[in-house]
Image (cartoon, coloured by chain):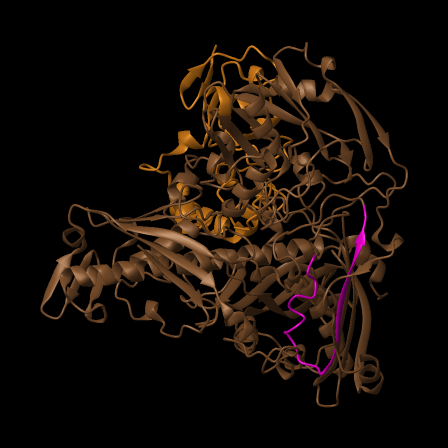
Amino acid sequence: MSAHLKQDQPDDRNVLDSTAQGIIGEPLTRPDGLLKVTGTATYSAEYDIENCLEGVLVTAPFAKGTVTSIDESSVTDMPGVIAVISDQRMTPRAIQGTAGEAPITGVCKVDYWGQPIALVVAETFEEARNAAKHLVIEYDADDDAVFDPQAVEPKPDDDPTRQGDLASAMSDAAHSVDVEYDTEGHASAAMEPHAAIAEWDGDTLTVHASLQMLNYNISELADAMELEESKVRLIARYVGGGFGSKLGISQEIVAGSVAAMELGRPVRVVMSRQQVFQNVMRRSETTQRLRLAVDSEGKLTAFGHEALVSNLPEEDFVEPVLQSSHFLYAGENRLLESKTARIHLMTAGSVRAPGEAVGMPVLEAAMDELANEVGIDPIKLRLNNIPEEHPATGLPFGSHKLAECLKQGAKAFGWDSGPRKPRQNREGEWWIGTGMASAARVHNVGEAKARVTLQPDGTALIETDMTDIGTGTYTILGQIAGEMVGLPQDSVLTELGDTRFPRGPGSGGSWGAASAGSAVFLACEALREEIADKVGQPVDTLTFKDGVVSWDGGSSSLADVAGDEALAKEGHYEPGDIAEDYTAASFGAFFTEVAVNRWTGETRVRRMTGAFGFGRVLNAKTARSQCLGGMVWCIGSALTESLLFDPTDGHLANCDLAEYHVPVNRDVPELEVIMVEERDPVGSPIQAKGVGELGMCGGAGAIGNAIYNACGARLRSFPMTPDKVLAAMPDD
Amino acid sequence: MPLKINNHPYDLPGDPRVSLLDFIRREAGLTGTKKGCDHGQCGACTVIVNGKRINSCLTLAVMHDGDEVTTIEGLGTPTEPSALQQAFVEHDGYQCGYCTPGQICSATAMLDEIAAGMPSDATDDVSGAPTLTDEEIRERMSGNLCRCGAYPNIVAAIREVAGAAS
């Protein structure tokens, strides 16, 4: 039995507001929490599998060319070494999110420095690591590799937006800015390195792997290994962070699978931290031009946003820099255009909030420049220009909370809407200033299936291959089911991360909760119908609470209703035609105060407030944590995070956590999160939208704007490291 | 003298290249101690050796003849969590959970360092006894990276436990 919904229409029934259990949205602790804090949650490399071999990847010490020979005999006599695997099935690149296939295989052709070219397998990790260092390879390195995106002719991406006449609007405007910004590349740097244990029993390949999207990953691995999907099983019960880097299968999974099938023994392959940095995914660096103009009323008349990004040849992914620029602000004369340069740095792909993570800070910095030009409060400039509908397509928004976020955030922060001039506040050697920015992120949903079973003991079991990468999936799916069928949190068990379960979209693009949550919701609606049948009452007269279903004049425990047989329902949610009629997006606003050191150029974020509207809050604790995490990423991308490639040979110079600077605890002050009440009937049948990425979509711009307000240094380059700040610091 | 992990004796490994981290995870089967970077840069592998927190990836198992190692599993269990473990759950001091055992081992030993009067960069008067301000917690926990960005919640969890103890 299944319940299917292809969402073509808004759902404003708000079913979860009329249920009785009272746990939806509540800040319940995570059911997996005690396992995580006691070290008993098992991540992919941690399964104790008998007879397991250890594999270590060998990577290319050049950026472009061909491996001509691999001398296996150089290591096969070393202690413990079992084999050297270099197989045409191995994938040289991590696969892009939702690819569902293995587009590039074969590791002898090298396209970037650090590309895996072989796997050394030995009895122990120490033996494999040592042998991997000594493997002799020969190669022909090409001398025409280009690493600088500015040094090649870029190709325009599809579908530029051109409306009206941007150039004329710019020249006719009362006020305008025409500025160029750049942003450096980012790494996901999830704390758990990419890891897999592959087992082959002669019929089925089972892989424990650290992955976000099993539904796509099983197709990718089956394709790479030339197996039927029915002969592949993926398990990812706990994932130590993803942030886009585990959307598609990565190289160690295929290499380990090949080795396990060749050798007839399980093989574990864990990438070193350096290998993760060098060959999983980078966020492209960007160069962006913003042209904004307003009339004398402070209304935008021109909106131009152009971007140059890069990727390897043959990769389809383009950092979608302009994604939210398409609809965030009005302006009748529009030009939005992106170009991609093909260069030989590692694959560019999804890193948390692809697009908005770098597009929004730059747009919001340019808006700040414009507000200064006009001489109006930056909040007012934004409130002036919130469009009634999508400025290009004309589609209405399902719900839109930007104005509320701006107002509530400003109030909580204590924003001073008086005249803003830089260099007004100094404490000793520190300049103090404030800045703000809007947040915006597109809303995505994907097809999802989940099974909910009412057990004979009156508890419920949820099963889906959806993952919990730290986002709180275990928690919120349990809350949705508990709310719908009337059970407390501890009476609902959620099982995730196994392709044997009904399949869903996985975690990525902030779509997991709304998609998988809707599948659970649909399954529960069907369960409620069946329970109604069993008790002989109309479903809309029933109250489900604390394991009891009651109606006017009677009640029954869910255990009694279930009887000896479990009641199982599968929910199947599909995005429908609704996207042709409506625009759905999450919005927010950031406010921050920074201190900038006059002599060192160091910036410290002293406080930060984020106000966000992302539809129904499914769990106020885990949703807040998602917002906090995003704001921490804002601090990193504003101030420190930058992939630095050697311009001569293309190797990543800062390929570890000592040199690539993610924020540490002391970089992060107390952060305030405001979750603005919202139900978006277009977002999903549970009125929820994505939250995982929204918190980092613009906040780096607020920090940059605060740096300007503090010390008068207007930087047009992220991250705003001390050297750049100092160079731009006006003389006292 | 054997190496003791959570009061259980283990013979030292035959291969001197085995890091204490890999020994804990593989030989002792205690995978609560995590490998995040293997280079002492992230703190996920933090354990407590003879009462002091260290990065277990930066030391070899054979260097710990006779030492007493406490890992996250030795601090508490799902049915009997330590006060810090419980506080991390209540305050959502984690998301993906991978850095969490290291955070909690680090925080456990850090509170002992404060009690012992050890100063830090955040201590205003290094000749006096440090007080556990939020800035002290942030400074002293900065060797444990959390990419999910749970830092404010981690500070809140530690603050609550330290406040209850003092």
Q: Quadrant of residue A110?
A: top right
Q: Is residue A28 left or right of residue B65?
A: left
- Please give the name of the residue rendered at 28% of the width and 67% of the height, measured from the top-left corner: A19
Is residue A561 depicted above or below A425 in this figure?
above
Is residue A267 depicted above or below A642 in this figure?
above
Judging depth in this view, the residue of A668 and B36 nearest the camera is B36
Q: Is residue A298 left or right of residue A513?
A: right
Q: Is residue A16 left or right of residue A707?
A: left
Is residue A311 depicted above or below A695 in this figure?
above
Rendered hue of chain A is brown
Q: Quadrant of residue A153?
A: bottom right
Question: Looking at the picture, how far across and down is residue A342, in whole percent?
Answer: 80, 51
Number of marks: 0
Question: Looking at the picture, how far across and down is residue A543, in whole percent?
Answer: 21, 66
- Please give the name of the residue rendered at 71% of the width and 45% of the height, measured from the top-left corner: A347
Rendered hue of chain B is orange
* Residue numbers of the magenta segment: A319-343
Judging depth in this view, the residue of A195 and A682 nearest the camera is A682
Question: Looking at the picture, how far across and down is residue A527, in whole percent?
Answer: 27, 58
Is residue A234 depicted above or below A457 in this figure?
above
Q: Quadrant of residue A359?
A: bottom right
In the picture, which quadrant includes the N terminus of chain A? bottom left
In this orientation, does residue B87 appear?
yes
